[in-house]
Amino acid sequence: MKISAVIPAYNSARFIADAVASINAQTTAIDEIIIIDDGSTDNTEQIVADLPGNIVYVKQPNQGPSAARNRGIEMAKGDWIAFLDADDQWTPDKIARQRQTLETYPSLHLIAGDMAEIDNQDKVIVDSVLAKHHLLDTFKTMAGKPIPNALSQLVKKNFIPTGTVLAKRGTLMEAGLFNPGIRFGEDLELWAKIAAQHPITCLPDVLMLRRQHGENATQASENMLIDLTKVMRSLCRHTGTQLQQQGIAPNRLVANSYWTLGYWYFAEGESNKARQAFRNSLRQRFSLRSALYFLVSLLPPHSIARLRRLKQKFS
């Protein structure tokens, strides 16, 4: 079993040495570290040149983290791929715990785990993201066993942090790798495709420290919500049969994603875009909620403002 670590990097000079050090500090060594510099304009390249370890460094024009990860996967010599972002760190026994799980459950194609969150001074600010989302006890009970109906669980809540993943290279290739056309949620799309075909698990152990800073904060935005509709449409196409087998209506996932986008537009006062999103939601699946908001979005702005004031008054 050979393991390649893939790190996408963009203007990562401040943190990448710590990321690589956390890989080199593993109690179970990996075989290579592939750093794909995605068009950095800082001195990332100079920092990497001085780092120890079996490092393969490639610089490419900026194409986004999905394209960078994909290139790393394609270049990798290992039959298993582990991911880490350049501003995050692995815990020392990350790989050892995952290899031990594979020995116990050799049918697994992907092993993820819990993560903690740290600030720029490496102070822990969240001990367990799984606990934060009320999932830790569930995965403690499973103790590394393949997750039953993992696909349906993923579309309810993506419990897989990319930097904790250890996955078979062939399985990643089979699933089509990360979708460069999706900037937000491309990881969920890939994990869901894999979960639809193969056993996966998530360990209740903290395997990664994710750095929280202003540059990586993800907030609700138009682009994020548009990408969510792309993810759900993709999953409807590629995993629709499996979703139905696991009790999830694929068209409802798509409809809900369009409703969420429509509501965001509606709250921003963009009635035309809201109306189109609610229309797309209704095309997938009728719901009274979407129909009501579609009709309200037809009203002139002053009437919508009056309805909002009434709603606030009575709520």
Image: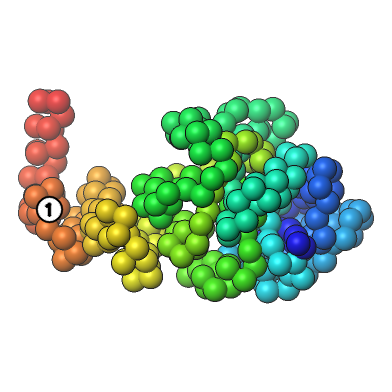
Q: Amino acid at mark 1?
A: Ser
The x and y percentages for residue 300 are 9, 52
Query: Which residue corresponds to the image point at 89% horizontal and 56% vertical from the top-left?
Result: 53
* Residue designated by label 1: 287
> Left or right: where does residue 196 sit relative to residue 63?
left
The x and y percentages for residue 99 are 71, 50
The x and y percentages for residue 104 are 64, 48
* In-front residue for pair 66/248: 248
Colouring convention used in this rendered image of the protein: rainbow
* In-front residue for pair 204/9: 204
Callout count? 1
Q: Is residue 78 visible?
A: yes
Quarter of image, res 239 = bottom left
Query: Which residue corresponds to the image point at 81% horizontal and 47% vertical from the top-left?
Result: 28
> Left or right: where does residue 67 sit relative to residue 251?
right
The x and y percentages for residue 312 are 15, 29
Query: Which residue corresponds to the image point at 12% horizontal and 32% vertical from the top-left?
Result: 311
Give the quarter of the figure containing the C terminus. top left
* In-front residue for pair 169/189: 169
Query: Which residue corresponds to the image point at 74% horizontal and 69% vertical from the top-left?
Result: 76
> Left or right: where does residue 134 sit relative to residue 208?
left
Give the quarter of the figure containing the N terminus. bottom right
Q: Is residue 163 visible?
A: no
